[in-house]
Amino acid sequence: MSDIQGTVFNIQRYSIDDGPGIRTTVFMKGCPLRCLWCSNPESQNAKPELTYRYTSCVKCGACVDACPNKALTLGAGGIQVDRERCACCGDCVKTCTAEALQISGKEMTIEEVFKTIKRDDVYYETSDGGVTASGGEILGQADFVAALFKKCHEAGYHTNADTSGYGSEEGLLKILEHSDLVYFDLKHMDPEKHQEAIGISNDVILKNLSIAAKSGVRVVIRFPLIPDYNDTAENLTAMAQFITDLNPEMTIHILPYHRYGESKYAMIGKTYPLSELRENSPEDLERVKNMFESFGLNCEISK
């Protein structure tokens, strides 16, 4: 088990938004979804990739000279990255004293990840916290996450699987076996609307949600509220009815739309597609909360 490797793009210690108590969140790299509002676009590519933070760059040009593949050029707008040429060798990162260049994604073993996790075990104990696996999409690296959670359970740590639900049933069951909690994203009930904004249909996701709901593991629905996309009465009613039929005891967390990840798109050479989209008003959030509660569902508005 200790030899299993996974691609991790971040390990966030002292996290308070990814489950109960104080947690360590392990972010796995790679996601088959392409949500237009994605807050972690650097998680989508399953392979390590170079990120560039313009605001940190001092435009010294040392990285340009260091690149063996001539993938970097320096202009008035800072460093330009030819991502077809870039091999993510890391030579440019080593020369960047301003830390404007970084490699997002690192192959790690279970033992390497757990070494970071166990540093904060006193916090897990005193706050009823634990370890969360997020992404990216954890089902894409199910063997790694299941093995990591197994080791966490052996140490007495609570585990939370944060998933979009898109992946194999086999992988889901492996992770569920060692999970105490599941945060399950649910974005839209209409398969065509789902395809339009996310790049895939929702059939696999709904099937896996049913499996998770019947597994005996506590499941919390995470619903990103996106204006003019999934906030219609028709979609909310269909979603509330689907959840009620699965398990009326389920809790729903409404995740207000935000643009916290917008700056990350430029860091990997992409353009954020929703820069003009308005954020939810307090009235929007209360309306949706009331809709879910009218079905008898427990509902919370997340920060």
Image (cartoon, grey):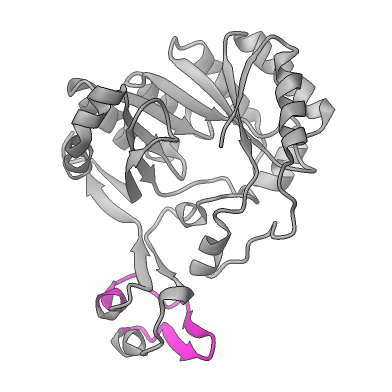
Q: Is residue 224 above or below residue 160?
A: below
Among the 4 quarters of the image, the one containing residue 74: bottom left
**Residue 20 vs residue 193: left or right?**
left
Q: Position of residue 88 (x, y in %)?
A: 34, 70
Q: Say which residue appears at 40% left-offset and 25% top-offset.
A: 20
Q: Please say whether residue 5 is one of the residues in the magenta stretch.
A: no
Q: Is residue 26 visible?
A: yes
Q: Say which residue appears at 37% left-offset and 90% top-offset.
A: 61
Q: Position of residue 302 (x, y in %)?
A: 57, 32
| Front position in the image: 67 or 133 | 133
Give the number of marks.
0
Among the 4 quarters of the image, the one containing residue 275: bottom right
Q: Which residues are magenta?
A: 67-94
Q: Position of residue 148 (x, y in %)?
A: 26, 32
Position of the C terminus by quadrant: top right
Among the 4 quarters of the image, the one containing residue 280: top right
Q: Is residue 256 above or below residue 157?
A: below
**Residue 119 vs residue 58: left or right?**
left
Q: Position of residue 34 (x, y in %)?
A: 60, 49
Q: Say which residue appears at 37% left-offset and 35% top-offset.
A: 133
| Front position in the image: 227 or 210 | 227
Q: Please say whether residue 92 is one of the residues in the magenta stretch.
A: yes
Q: Say which residue appears at 51% left-offset and 61% top-offset.
A: 264
**Residue 155 vs residue 168: left or right?**
left
Q: Is residue 269 above or below residue 104?
A: below
Q: Is residue 150 visible?
A: no
Position of the N terminus by quadrant: top left
